[in-house]
Image: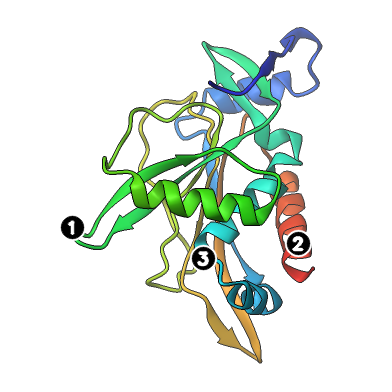
Amino acid sequence: MSNKYELIDEKNWKRAMHCMVFRDSVEPAFCVTFELDITKFLRKIKESGYSFTMAMIFVVSKCANEIEEFRYRFVDGQVALFEKIDTAFTYLDQDTELFKVVNVPMQDIMEDYVELAARTAREQKEYFTGPLGNDVFQFSPMPWVSYTHISHTNSGKKDNATPLFDWGKYFERDGKVLLPFSVQAHHSFVDGLHVGRLAEAIQDYLEQ
């Protein structure tokens, strides 16, 4: 069952003009890469015995869900605002070295999410279980390299407004553990301002 959404009356929506301008772009999504300080977070995750990947997916999804702009999508050509967004992530099959895409509903508590995500990923046999719903955040971590920039494949579907989050291999600098982190979002709904708010919210959460 998909999450609830409300259709937006675009005649009375403050973002209508911006949405229209960017929606017609050849490439309506933009991608930003920045570093996150995960020093405290990494220590706590290791103490808890949680998967770093699953814990990060939870943190990012929790923070992104709290920013309205990241919950907008196009539904049958119309602008819709979802109440809640779930998760979909890539997970490597160690035997075949091919990834599968795993869908996991967002949970209120990290412990619950990490447990459910790990179990779902382990038990899923298929690489792809069908087309992704509109109501997910996509995650595709790349922990083998500390990158400074990343780009993504483009389906050519301009109305695909699903945000995509990635991170690379974390590394140490000046006594801190840093993580290269990327946000790709549809410019019809998300501006640099909102990426900035998300970056701040994630960093605040990681510091707690």
Q: Which mark is residue 96?
A: 1
Image spot of residue 119 (x, y percent)? 44, 51
Vertical order, 63 against 3 (above or below): below
Q: Residue at 33%, 28% (x, y): give it.
A: 130
Q: Are marks 1 and 2 in contact (CB under 8 Å)?
A: no
Q: Secondary structure at mark 2?
A: helix
Number of marks = 3
Q: Alpha carbon of mark 2 to alpha carbon of mark 3: how far?
A: 17 Å
Q: Amino acid at mark 1?
A: Thr
Q: Secondary structure at mark 1?
A: loop
Q: Alpha carbon of mark 3 to alpha carbon of mark 1: how far?
A: 21 Å
In the foreground, 73 or 121: 121
Q: Residues within 10 Å of mark 3 (few under 14, many from 20)?
A: some
Q: Which mark is residue 205?
A: 2
Q: Quadrant of the C terminus?
A: bottom right
Q: Amino acid at mark 2?
A: Tyr
Q: Which mark is residue 51?
A: 3
Of the image marks 1 and 2, the number of the one nearer the N terminus: 1
Q: Residue at 46%, 26% (x, y): give it.
A: 158
